[in-house]
Amino acid sequence: MTRILKPKQTRRSVLKKMAAGSALVAGSAAMPGFVRYSQAQSSAPIKIGFQQHVTGIGAAYGRWYGRTTEAAAKMINDAGGINGRPVEIIAEDDGTDPKRGAEVVEKFANQHGCDVAFGTLFSHVVIGSAPRAGELKLPYFVVSEGHHVASGMLNRYTLQPGITDVKSQVQAMAPFVADNLGKKVTMIFPDFAFGHDHRDYFSEAIEKQGGQVLAKIAIPPTESSFTRYFPQIPRETEVVYHVMVGPAVLTFVKEMGEFFGSSRPEIFGFIDSLEAVDIGSAGLEFLDGTYFWEGNPRYAQADQSDFDKAYRAAVGVDDNGASVSDPKDVSTYAHMFGCWETLHIIKAGMEAAGYAGPDDRSKLIEAVEAVTDMPHSNEHPQGAKLFNGKTHQVFGHQYISKVTDGKLIVAHTTSIEDTFYPDEVDYTTQPF
Amino acid sequence: MIFRSLRSPAAPHLTALTSLLLTSPANAHTSEQAFVLLLPTGIYTVAGVSVVAVTMGIMALLPKGSERLAFGSRGLFGLPRSDLTAATSVLSFGMLLCLIWIGFTGSPSPLKNLLPLVFWTLFWMGFLTLQAVFGNLWHWLNPWTGPYRLLPRRLREAEIADLPERFGSWPGAVLFLAFGCFMLADIAPEDPSRLATIIAAYWVFTFICMILFGGERWLARGEFLTMLLDRYALLSIFARRDGQLRAGMPCWQLIESRSVAFSVAVLVLLLLGTGSFDGVNETFWWLAKIGINPLEFPGRSAVFWPTTIGLLAANALLLGAFALVIWTGLRLAGSDTEFTEAFGVLAMSMLPIALAYHAAHYLTAYIVQIQYALLALNDPLATGADWLGFGQSQVTTGFFNTRDTVRIIWLSQAGVVVIGHVLSVLVGHVMVSRLFSKQRDVLLAQLPLALFMILYTLFGLWLLATPRGA
């Protein structure tokens, strides 16, 4: 990692120099080979601490979060960096562990001199790290999907502007399920809080659509065979909603296929069960014709946007959502766009705030809180979004895809409004 | 162990905090584990255990002494007399210094920093196995012997303090256990600067002990890496003997072990015990035992004490079980052979199993980590260099995503475990034959050991097949 000493400057000098810097950047674009970064102000990099799940249970996600982050940083740097300064990603392994997560946040602030921290996925690590980020007054941009940000349990320094939360995702599924698949639902979920959250939020949402949950089948987390649970599915079930996770998930799909044979109800699940698994894998044929929530469509669709095309190319992902260098290396496509989009929001926020250094961190938070619309663009390839500055949570379109010939084809895109729920917190009232 | 996550699917989120939270489901990364559960591992396990059992049957039928023929060796060619190990050791020490420097000043990411990649992936996962296959390469790489020889003779011969004989090799055994705790229970054993601190401190500690107690003495009885690598070298095909390079069947040197210190025997069993626990602690079974939901593993910090206590208990259990096996065997044969003598030599026969566990356990992590290691070697100072011409290559784990490749990987692991047990059976048979003169006594004394090895085969294959959550 290159280490560049950052000269001390006054805010006024920075602001003054920024104007000159912008002109230089604009000029440099037209002059190949010309120094890319503004030399008028500090060319010290903006340091972004990347709290990465390198080891621990999140490592498979961490690898793709890493690739996406590097691609986004490259794109930002190729376009002149942030406020004319290059972006430097400083990745630290949090071991997917909350205690280590807090230590890493501390290293970002005190040892590496990072401007912000970013990139955490797993909820327990976010929950373990956010209080420390708050104490250190380090802006902490998480990419977690957890409802912990919008629930109000965290703090003013923690934001989730690049990925929607699960509460909004789950409730947005209900209208499509009720209107197209059926109103009598049986839910199969792992018997702990993750499954319980799906159970509770979906039950409430489907009832609002005039549907009902006929049975709630909770599977003990240590189970690795499921045949004895399937007979509990009521006969009149029109839709099975499943959110199984863990190493036994392929066994679950196989056994469900064997149980239903050729006559099955409609089946709806969350792609998390099969994130990074080739849908065309032997044994998954049974999934053909079933539906999945996708945070971002893994397969390039017929109406693929230019933004998605550019994003795939930058990260090195092919039309099937796999690595261009190994078609079997399927990415965590439904989630990793969050890193890309979050980095671009950090850039936009820093530029709006005239961010010059750690003293401007509160200005950066205020600038991001002031963001509302995020149009579908190269910066937001997953789709348009609306940011709620009060709850620090972004809202966006969700995708429901149907497995067709071993590929996921988008059958429905929710509106952003489908994902709204009443605010549970107003972080802007908290002092810095 | 540290790289467990590469194999396990991610689990959900910590939820005990509040039921208000809709925990994000970004956890269900189904990897090679999911495909393993679809493989007919039950059939494979029966086949593997049968191979070990049949080997035992054949051994029992062969006339006494015939198995020793298999462990002969032959000279290949003469080796030059010059001893360059001091020079290579100094070179190795220089490289270690560079790595420690990189650990402190390089990328904080364990996937990019050369120190954790070289230490954990190339050395701990890879080199141990190379040593066991090709012979005592550590003799050349040991980073203490060269610098030690550069010390003034007066200092080297001073032996300032005494390391009493009754301490045997216990210092090394204790240090190995401490290393095991660091590897399995520490919150971040791969963190570059943390690892650099520990490696630097251990190098200095060892060097001081060498000066205090005498270099060779401390390396042989206190420096656990040299101790375990010297033992693993006994499994190898090649060895230097009387200025010659000799080759033979794996373990041909191991059967030369005649009297083994009790503390060395314990160290060998600690290798096996620690390696075994380093599989158990990831299983659904273990996680359920310590009250952890295997689908939402909370991280190492939450299981520090269960892991530490579990590691110590697993080793105690193995030592106790093995002692019982030896004691019962001696009783069955009605032998007056000393318990410690039998315990010592027969513990050595467990070395192939210990190595097999090591190789099988790390195989999946190794094939991923080695890619990172090569990329880091390509650009060791993170300056954008392309020394090895890998360019912008990306690491892949695609081989965990198809049933066919997962089957190949699993069968390779299982094959290594079975071969390890077969070798242990052969070596154990030779050792027991040497302790008893009558064929009947050999068979009776071996019965408990045979049962133990069959159960251990079953256990090893179960470990590979059972769902893991950490």
Image (spheres, coloured by chain):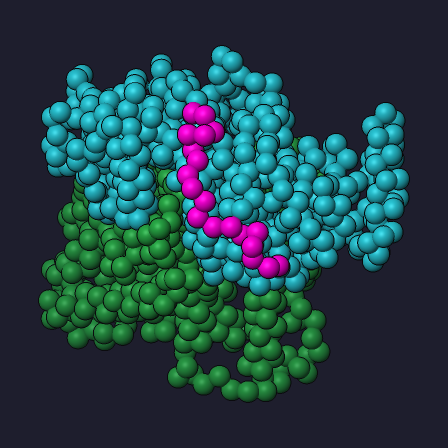
Chain colours: A cyan, B green
Q: Is residue B192 above or below residue A39?
A: below
Residue B158's image quarter? bottom right
Q: Is residue B452 above or below residue B173?
A: above
Tell me, yes or no, if residue B113 can be seen here.
Answer: no
- Residue located at (27% from left, 21% from top): A181
In the rendered image, residue B246 lying in the magenta stretch gets the answer no
Q: Position of residue B270 (x, y in %)?
A: 35, 65
Q: Position of residue B172 (x, y in %)?
A: 45, 72
In this view, which residue lies farthest toward the top? A302
Residue in the foreground of this view, choosing between B390 and B470? B470
Q: How many marks?
A: 0
Residue B403's image quarter? top left
Residue B371's image quarter? top right
Q: Position of residue A277 (x, y in %)?
A: 39, 30
- Residue located at (28% from left, 24% from top): A178
| Residue B240 relative to residue B386: left or right | left
Q: Position of residue B46 (x, y in %)?
A: 18, 40
Residue in the foreground of this view, choosing between B50 and A115? A115
| Residue B336 relative to residue A396: left or right | left
In the rendered image, residue A427 lying in the magenta stretch gets the answer yes
- Residue located at (35% from left, 55% from top): B18
Q: Quadrant of the N terminus of chain B?
A: bottom left
Q: Is residue B290 above or below residue B364?
A: below
Residue in the foreground of this view, choosing between B242 and A393? A393
- Residue located at (49% from left, 35% from top): A395
Magenta highlight range: A414-432
Label the magenta part by its dominant secondary structure. Answer: loop
Residue in the foreground of this view, choosing between A395 and A194? A395
Tell me, yes or no, if residue A167 can be seen here.
Answer: yes
